[in-house]
Amino acid sequence: MSRVGNKPVTIPSNVTIDVQDHTLTVKGPKGELTRTFDPQITINVEENEITFERPNNQKNVRALHGTTRALVNNMVLGVSEGFKKTLLLQGVGYRAQAQGNKLTLSVGLSHPAEFDIPEGIEVDLPSNTEINISGADKDLVGQFAANVREIRRPEPYKGKGVRYSDEHIIRKEGKTGK
């Protein structure tokens, strides 16, 4: 039995919800998000909370029940508070620059790596070795941060590379000479 799906999602006062067929639109101070959900799950919007109902207890319907609730909760949190990921560049000469809608990284490759910043994402550089990625869509923020990190993942010997600010790198001992 899905316990996640049974929990209602509370709607903050500055967020508006609109349900058309199985498409949910959430508007708030940080932006607007729209998503279409599976028709098996019924989405009910009352005064200040959203509840979810499923027609039966089949395994795939129970999974959809909890997933739908989690996705709607992330949409509500995103438009009201937003999501943020912080990346750190660690290594000699590693630096980042943001110009317009492009993020350029110099991370020890033969050429600078360029990323197009997607619409709905904000990139802030407090220093040239720190990247703050924020936005209303949790999926988009996480995927963009993962794409940036993938250009040079942290290696286990010196810890050089692009890593999340809360990530712990397990260090290995190098060769020891006699």
Image: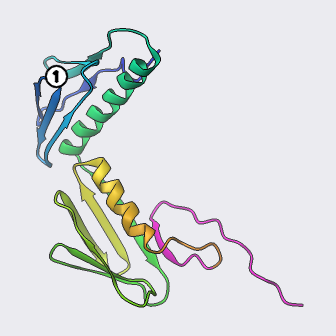
| The furthest residue to the right | 178
Colour scheme of the rendered structure: rainbow
Image coordinates for residue 73, horizontal then vertical, percent? 28, 33
Say above or below: 65 vs 158. Answer: above
**Residue ID at (65%, 77%):** 157
Describe residue 84's horizontal placement relative to residue 2 as left or right. Answer: left
Where does the magenta region start and end? 158-178
Q: Nearer the viewer, residue 115 or 78?
A: 115
Please identify the dominant SS of the magenta region. Answer: loop
> Does the segment drawn in magenta span residue 130?
no
- Amino acid under disc 1: Asn
Residue placed under numbered mark 1 in the picture: 48
**Residue ID at (47%, 14%):** 1
**Residue ID at (42%, 85%):** 94
Task: Please tell me how crowded label 1 is: few (under 14), some (14-19), or many (20+) other residues with Cα within 10 Å.
Answer: some
Image coordinates for residue 9, horizontal then vertical, percent? 27, 26
**Residue ID at (34%, 32%):** 70
Which image quarter: residue 127?
A: bottom left
Q: Count of labels shown?
A: 1
Describe residue 110's horizontal placement relative to residue 15 as left or right. Answer: right
Describe residue 97's horizontal placement relative to residue 158 as left or right. Answer: left
Image coordinates for residue 133, horizontal then vertical, percent? 29, 63
